[in-house]
Image (spheres, helix red, strand yellow):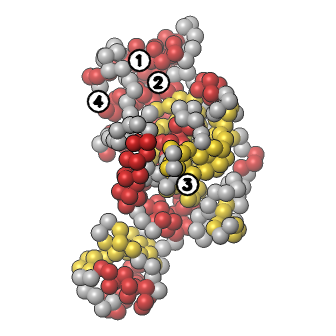
């Protein structure tokens, strides 16, 4: 996986072009079958680059996640891998087929759950699946049995004749995931599978996805900007500004940070940031309205902070490393800060595409 940035402080790394690159993320990766591969993948809209050169390999049977803020390029990358967008540069293969030269073959071997709902609300659950099966060429002799199996798998067999517009958001999402599996794809793409759902429904959807992984021989490739959802993945590629900035397992990414995050509010935050650098050698930033920095053994540092920082501290919190800390270690900002700054770029890109920003 040459070209993928390594986790900071991680083992097995080398210097290259002024930045860290991974030498071997998984020891036996050469022996593992690759379901999705990309090299130098780029997507541009005029002078705006939505994706800036993606290199990755996703292994068969893996649950692989793109984690990053809205506007980071996750959905654009998914769209290229699913043949919905043509890359501006680079190459990619899905299920062994080229996404540009063998588009039809790619489409036959993938399932796709869009970020936005694409079900027909005026048709029943059963009819939605039947229509999908016919479009994908599922033989008529097996379509009824396969439809029944999918509806039972997603817990909607009793509602098979009900119109989809009578379903809750969670029921619709389960049906969409089931529909994506109807034609027995080798790779299932899930673009923000729980966006817009309440926490309880999100948890239910992920419980179902985990069960699905245990019973189906399938590779899952998902995008999310929810930190807790990324924990379900075998490996995560953290994206920002159209690039992959880290790629590893969730635990390895968190372990690579190795420091606690401290947040404080003070009477003079700008002065506090300067003094933290001068007196403690710490790099601090403003994040979500708080002065934020990382230290070893944060709970032991806090008493020293109160005694030695000549600025009144109003509040302080200490947190163990999270995936948000990994994101901050690379970018100097949290994922929510990144989403805020990406919104203007997204509007520019939508304008160039002739679409209204969402």
Q: Position of residue 215 (x, y in %)?
A: 55, 32
CA distance for labels 1 and 4: 16 Å
Q: CA distance from mark 3 to mark 1?
A: 36 Å
- Separation of residues labelled 2 and 3 (CA atoms): 31 Å
Question: Residue 171: in sight, yes or no?
Answer: yes
Considering every residue shown, the one lying at the far right of the view is 31
Q: CA distance from mark 2 to mark 1?
A: 8 Å
Front-lying residue, 260 or 106:
106
Q: Are marks 3 and 1 in contact (CB under 8 Å)?
A: no
The number of discs equals 4
Question: Mark 2 or mark 1: which comes first in sequence?
Answer: 1
Mark 4 vs 3, N-terminal side? 4
Numbered disc 3: secondary structure: strand
Label 2–label 1 contact, CB within 8 A? yes
Residue 220 seen in the current view:
no
Residue at the disc numbered 2? 179
Of callouts 4 and 2, the N-terminal one: 4
- Give the residue at x 47% y 86%: 281
Residue 29 in the figure: left or right of residue 190 = right
Which residue is tagged 4?
Answer: 168
For the residues marked 4 and 2, what is the alpha-carbon distance in whole angstroms? 16 Å
Kindly state the secondary structure of the residue where label 1 is placed. helix
Image point (32%, 65%), residue name: 288
Mark 3 residue crowding within 10 angstroms, few (<14) / some (14–19) / many (20+): many
Q: Which mark is residue 243?
A: 3
- The answer to which of marks 1 and 4 sits earlier in the sequence is 1
Q: Are marks 4 and 3 in contact (CB under 8 Å)?
A: no
Q: Nearer the viewer, mark 2 or mark 3?
A: 3
Query: 356 or 261, which is in the foreground?
Result: 356
Q: Quadrant of the C terminus?
A: top left
Are discs 4 and 2 less than 8 Å apart at CB? no
């Amino acid at each position: 996986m040459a070209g993928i940035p390594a986790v900071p402080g991680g083992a097995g790394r080398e210097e290259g072009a002024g930045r860290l690159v991974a030498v071997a993320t998984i020891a036996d990766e050469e022996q593992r079958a690759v379901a999705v591969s990309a090299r130098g993948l780029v997507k541009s809209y005029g002078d705006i680059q939505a994706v800036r050169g993606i290199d990755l390999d996703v292994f068969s049977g893996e649950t692989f996640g793109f984690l990053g803020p809205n506007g980071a390029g996750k959905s654009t990358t998914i769209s290229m891998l699913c043949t919905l967008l043509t890359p501006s540069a680079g190459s990619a293969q899905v299920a062994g087929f080229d996404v540009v030269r063998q588009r039809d073959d790619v489409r036959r071997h993938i399932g796709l759950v869009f970020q936005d709902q694409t079900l027909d609300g005026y048709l029943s659950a059963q009819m939605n699946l039947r229509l999908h099966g016919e479009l994908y060429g599922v033989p008529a002799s097996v379509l009824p049995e396969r439809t029944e199996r999918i509806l039972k798998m997603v817990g909607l067999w009793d509602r098979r004749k009900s119109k989809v517009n009578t379903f809750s958001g969670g029921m619709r999402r389960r049906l969409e995931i089931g529909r994506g599996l109807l034609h027995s794809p080798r790779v299932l793409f899930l673009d923000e599978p729980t966006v817009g759902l309440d926490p309880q429904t999100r948890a239910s959807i992920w419980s179902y996805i985990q069960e699905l992984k245990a019973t189906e021989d399938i590779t899952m490739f998902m995008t999310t900007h929810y930190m807790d959802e990324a924990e379900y993945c075998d490996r995560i590629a953290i994206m920002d500004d159209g690039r992959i900035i880290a790629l590893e397992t969730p635990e390895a990414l968190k372990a690579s940070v190795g420091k606690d995050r401290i947040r404080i509010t003070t009477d003079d935050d700008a002065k506090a940031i300067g003094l933290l650098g001068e007196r403690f050698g710490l790099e601090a930033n403003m994040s979500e309205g708080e002065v934020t920095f990382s230290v070893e053994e944060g709970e032991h540092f806090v008493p020293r902070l109160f005694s030695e920082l000549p600025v009144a501290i109003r509040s302080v919190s200490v947190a163990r490393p999270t995936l948000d800390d990994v994101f901050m270690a690379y970018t100097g900002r949290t994922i929510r800060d990144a989403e805020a700054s990406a919104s203007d770029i997204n509007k520019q890109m939508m304008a160039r595409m002739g679409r209204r920003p969402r």
